[in-house]
Amino acid sequence: MRFTDQADSAIRSFRLVGFEDPSASSKSWNLGSFEYNISKNGLQEFNVPTEVFGKEIPPLHSISLAVDSNWGHEYSCLYRFRVHGDKD
């Protein structure tokens, strides 16, 4: 694997969508739109809501990351994406 030192290849705008089943074929929950800031530390945290349109988000079994833009490079790089939560 080769890593790039091109900060402009980092993702910029992205969305998170959660699904109630592992195969991502059930009801989807829009968990928000976010922006990765290349002038901050490499490890950044983004909080998602516990409710959407007044409805509590149920336990989710799969998450989809949709990359909408990067910082200007012809391709985008994402080296790690981690999801943490509380199990009720």
Image (spheres, grey):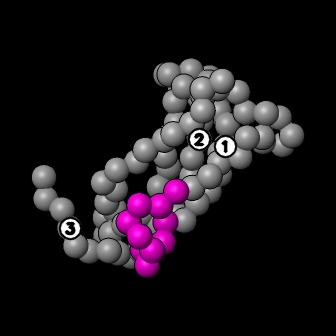
Residues 12 and 72: in front is 12
Q: Earlier in the sequence, mark 2 or mark 3?
A: 3
Q: Residue at x 13, y 52 (%)?
A: 1
Is residue 74 in view from this perspective?
Answer: yes
Mark 3 — residue? 4
Q: Residue at x 43, y 44 (%)?
A: 82
Q: Please tell me whether mark 2 sits on a helix, a strand or a loop.
A: strand
Position of 12 relative to 50 (above/below): below
Q: Which mark is residue 30?
A: 1
Crowdedness near tag 2: few (<14), some (14–19) or many (≥20) residues, C-alpha within 10 Å: some
Q: Which residues are magenta?
A: 36-45
Residues 86 and 53: in front is 86
Q: Are marks 1 and 2 in contact (CB under 8 Å)?
A: yes
Q: Which mark is residue 17?
A: 2
Does 72 sit left or right of 30 as displayed?
left
Position of 77 relative to 55 (above/below): below
Crowdedness near tag 1: few (<14), some (14–19) or many (≥20) residues, C-alpha within 10 Å: some
Does 52 sit left or right of 8 as displayed?
right
Q: Rounded to the nearest whole Å, what is the CA distance between mark 2 and mark 3?
A: 28 Å
Q: Are marks 2 and 3 in contact (CB under 8 Å)?
A: no
Residues 77 and 61: in front is 61
Q: Rounded to the nearest whole Å, what is the CA distance between mark 1 and mark 2?
A: 5 Å
The amino acid type found where label 2 is placed reads: Val
Q: Looking at the figure, which quarter contains the C terminus?
A: top right
Crowdedness near tag 3: few (<14), some (14–19) or many (≥20) residues, C-alpha within 10 Å: few
